[in-house]
Amino acid sequence: MRNKLIFRKAKISDAEDIKKLTDFYARRGIMLFRPIYEIYSDIRDYFVAERNKKIVGCCALHVLGKEYKPGNRGRILAETRSLVVAKKFQKRGMGTKLVEECIREAGRMGINKIFTLTLEENVSFFKRLGFRTIRKSGLPQKIWQECVNCSRFPSNCNETPLILEI
Ligand SMILES: CC(C)(COP(=O)(O)OP(=O)(O)OC[C@H]1O[C@@H](n2cnc3c(N)ncnc32)[C@H](O)[C@@H]1OP(=O)(O)O)[C@@H](O)C(=O)NCCC(=O)NCCS
């Protein structure tokens, strides 16, 4: 069948295609590089969009676990990350579908808070999906696990944090 588009969980054989898709934007400073070993070890995090047997989009739901911060009310935290749609397939709803798959999976797993860090140009995309902007200090786990290793940390960070409570 022509132009067959499916959204599914990633398989091991998708890892190198995920790497190529995400490296394209990592080279442009739009997302973090993920080494291939990390994509393999986190492969269960990823959803992919497959068009005519080719991977044209991906998004990962990465579980952080119980939220450790004052006032936590039993929140279990996860992050949507590595969201990419190949340039020529953008603006057709694929990115939305990939994030919706992550949100559905989070709901099934009992996760009740999803966050993302994104550039200003994508803020309206996430808001349309129900996310709202917060201050970076609202995400201490992300900051101490990953942001501290970023060359832009702390004062040159160009990303906006958003959360979705489900
Ligand atoms: C961010 C990204 C994944 C969005 O993917 P996408 O497939 O273009 O997303 P969608 O098509 O679902 O939505 C994008 C926009 O197109 C619009 N759109 C969706 N379907 C459409 C259609 N059929 N016709 C016209 N516009 C459409 C949406 O309303 C949305 O507008 P908004 O951003 O103002 O809310 C993509 O732009 C991308 O890969 N960017 C580079 C990497 C990146 O920045 N990743 C995010 C890191 S957190």
Image: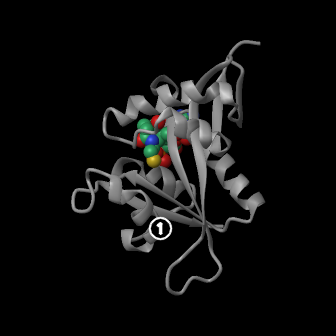
> Residue 126: image x %, image y %?
50, 54
- Residue most toward the top? 2
Q: Position of residue 162 (x, y in %)?
A: 46, 62
Up/down of 32 relative to 79, above or below: above
Position of residue 118 in the picture relative to residue 69 (left or right) = left
Name the residue located 36 percent from the left edge and 47 percent from the top edge: 121
Q: Is residue 27 above or below residue 73?
A: above
Q: Return the residue nearer the eye: 131 or 128.
A: 131
Residue at the bottom extreme of this rendering: 71
Residue at 31% across / 34% down in the picture?
28
| Quarter of the image that includes the C terminus | bottom right
- Identify the secondary structure beneath mark 1: helix
**Disc 1 C-beta below 8 A from ligand 1:** no
In this view, the residue in front, 63 or 2, is: 63
Single out the residue that lies furthest toward the left. 155
Q: Position of residue 165 (x, y in %)?
A: 61, 69
Residue at (34%, 59%) from the top-left corner? 148
Disc 1 designates what residue?
141
Return the residue nearer the eye: 61 or 15.
15
